[in-house]
Amino acid sequence: MPAAVRTEPLKRQNGRPGTMQERYDLLVVKMKQKYGIRVRRWRKSMSGVAWEVHYRDGSVSRLIESPYPRGPMSAAIFLHEIGHHAIGFRRYRPRCLEEYHAWKWAVEEMENQGILVTERVKKRMHDSLRYAVAKAMRRGLKRLPQELIPYVPEMK
């Protein structure tokens, strides 16, 4: 017989989550419910991926893999992957612009949820966007969107 699965985090007597981990647990529950997302796998590494599966009957499964939020960095990566679903896939072109908006959404959501946006999180965002812009440029990007100019890699 399978073990019971908790759908909501434990709450204190006042009804609000108390520890940071309880707040992260609540964040996971809220985001999965709000955006109809299923976590395919919780990763041990600090990387993630988001995708959709479109079925012949017209239904769509929204999936992610990411680290479980246990601190600001893993929360940022989790929210970045949720952000891809929140903003919509293929809404922004080129792909590096979609990455920018997913990161922007994640950082804004961290601030809204009262999660500290650390310098390490900001550096991770910057490094990720610099990599995405460099990749797009290597592949022949014709026009760089204005928002991405700060992330153009330095020429060697």
Image (tube, rainbow, N blue to C red):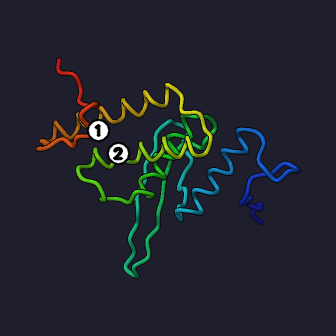
Q: Determine the residue located farthest toward the right in the rendered image.
A: 13
Name the residue nearer the viewer: 62 or 127: 127
Residue 5, horizontal then vertical, whole percent: 73, 60
Report helix, strand or loop for mark 1.
helix
The amino acid type of the residue labelled 2 equals: Glu
| Among the 4 quarters of the image, the one containing residue 6 | bottom right
Query: Dot 2 surroundings within 10 Å: few (below 14), some, or many (20 or more)?
Result: many
Residue 73, horizontal then vertical, whole percent: 54, 34
Report helix, strand or loop for mark 2.
helix
Quick check: 74 left or right of 81? right
The residue under label 2 is: 99
Contact? badges 2 and 1 (CB < 8 Å): yes
Position of 117 relative to 90 (above/below): above
Residue in the picture at 32% in, 49% down: 98
Residue 15, horizontal then vertical, whole percent: 82, 53
The residue under label 1 is: 132
